[in-house]
Image (spheres, rainbow, N blue to C red):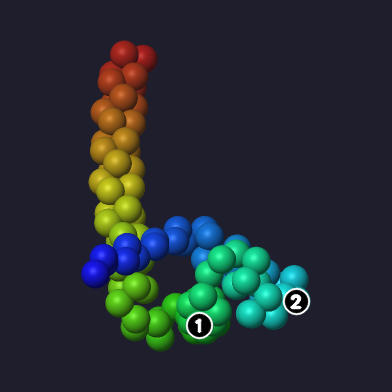
C-alpha cells in the first residue's frame, strides 16, 4: 500500500480561498470544488479565520504564531542594530562639526 503525500497550502492560498466564500458569495462546496480542495478543509479554514486571533489554539495557528514571533524578533534585532549605527554616525558628525 502506498502512502499518500499530504498537500501543504500557503497562508495566502488559504486566505484567498476563504475570501471566495466570505466576500464573493461562493458556497464552501462550490469554492472547494473549483480549487480542488476538500470542502471540510475549506470550512475549517473559514472557521479559523473567523476566530479572534487570541482565541485560536489549533496547532496550525500555533505554528503560524511561532513563525511570526521568529520573524518579529529578527526584525527587532535588525532595527536595534540600525539604530545603534545611526547613533554612532550622529555622534561622529557632531564631533566633526563642533
**SS for dot 1:** helix
On the image, the x and y values in percent for residue 12 come to 52, 58
Give the quadrant of the C terminus.
top left
Identify which residue, 57 or 13, lies in the foreground: 13
Q: Tally the marks.
A: 2
Q: Nearer the viewer, mark 2 or mark 1?
A: 1
Q: Residue at x 34, y 81 (%)?
A: 58
Q: Residues within 10 Å of mark 2 (few under 14, many from 20)?
A: few
Asked if one can make out residue 22 in the rendered structure from this viewpoint, the answer is no
Furthest residue in direction top, as rendered:
96
Name the residue: 33% across, 43% down: 79
* Image quadrant in which you'd find residue 89: top left
Whole-percent x and y of residue 54?
40, 81
Quadrant of the drawing holding the N terminus: bottom left
In the drawing, what numbered circle is on residue 1?
none
- Give residue 55's position: percent from left, percent from top: 40, 86
**Which residue: 28% across, 48% down?**
74
How many angstroms separate mark 2 from mark 1 (CA)? Answer: 17 Å
Q: Is residue 35 above or below residue 74?
A: below
Left or right, residue 15 beside residue 57 = right
Label 2 with label 1: CB-CB less than 8 Å:
no
Is residue 25 visible to us here? yes
Relative vertical location of residue 65 with respect to residue 53 in this rendering, above or below: above
Instruction: Give whichever of 56, 30 is nearer the camera.
Output: 30
Assign a secondary structure to mark 2.
loop
- Which numbered marker is on residue 25? 2
> As drawn, which residue projects farthest toward the right?
25
Task: Assess disc 1: are there few (<14), some (14-19) or many (≥20) residues with their C-alpha within 10 Å of its C-alpha.
Answer: few
Residue under circle 1?
40
Q: Earlier in the sequence, mark 2 or mark 1?
A: 2
Amino acid at each position: 500500500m502506498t502512502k499518500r503525500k499530504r498537500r501543504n497550502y500557503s497562508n495566502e492560498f488559504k486566505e484567498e480561498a476563504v475570501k471566495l466564500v466570505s466576500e464573493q458569495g461562493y458556497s464552501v462546496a462550490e469554492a472547494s470544488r473549483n480549487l480542488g480542495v476538500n470542502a471540510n478543509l475549506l470550512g475549517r479554514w473559514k472557521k479559523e479565520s473567523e476566530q479572534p486571533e487570541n482565541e485560536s489554539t489549533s496547532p496550525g495557528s500555533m505554528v503560524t504564531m511561532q513563525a511570526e514571533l521568529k520573524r518579529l524578533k529578527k526584525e527587532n534585532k535588525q532595527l536595534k542594530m540600525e539604530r545603534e549605527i545611526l547613533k554612532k554616525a550622529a555622534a561622529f558628525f557632531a564631533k566633526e562639526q563642533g
